[in-house]
Image: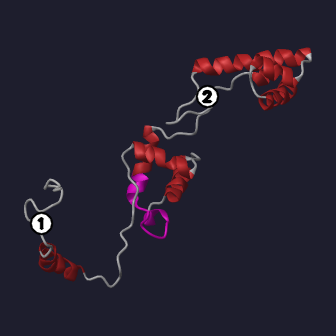
Amino acid sequence: MKYPEGGGLTAERRAFREGIRLQAGERFAAGDKTAAIAKDLRVSVRSVERWRRAWREGGMAALHSTGPANSPTIADEQFAVLEAELGKGPTALGFEDERWTLARVQTLIRRRLRVSLSVATVWRPLKRHGWSWQAPARRALERDEHAVELWKKEVWPRVKASRRRPEPGSSSRTKPASR
């Protein structure tokens, strides 16, 4: 069972579950029925069936814990190499434009660091090291920056000032309700 925030089972809990699987293995050897084992050990029948299949194929050794399930990670030294590559820019590394997408960073990590991460997992080390996502500014090709700045300086203050300002005490929130 996985917990939020990237947690997992503690070592004690993993050992407890391993003990239950080993008890089930002893019952498999004794010839007990799956449903009876599930009821006595208070686990699902499906889990017992999965354990029985593993026990048939690998014996009691197949029921031992394999340790915590970890996804591949990038060490700080590897991330320093990745940052240097990211600093070169996407076009210098063979991409057609100047946008870093998670898929492109994933490709870069696979090529340069020889680590295979999912696209969803690529974001974690980037965020951990202070990187943020990029949103390209969408602007019309016909946009005239000079005209926009002129409008902001001259027209916008007049438009903003022309709004009717309420006189003190005229708001219904400031006057008590009359009956």
Occupied quadrant, residue 133: bottom left
Horizontal arrangement in the rendering, residue 13 relative to residue 23 (left or right)? left
Q: Give the range drawn in magenta.
A: 84-99
Within 10 angstroms of label 1, few (less than 14), some, or many (20 or more) residues?
Answer: few
Write down the residue under mark 1.
166
Image point 68% across, 26% down: which residue? Answer: 66
Task: Give above or below for 153 relative to 64.
Answer: below
Residue furthest left in the image: 168
Horizontal arrangement in the rendering, residue 14 relative to residue 134 (left or right)? right
Occupied quadrant, residue 135: bottom left
The quarter of the image holding the N terminus is top right
Q: Can residue 60 be seen in this view?
A: no
Horizontal arrangement in the rendering, residue 107 relative to residue 44 (left or right)? left
Pick whichever, 95 or 159, lies toward us: 159
Task: Give above or below for 106 relative to 139.
Answer: above
Marks counted in the figure total 2
Image point 45% across, 44% down: which residue? Answer: 125
The x and y percentages for residue 154 are: 12, 79
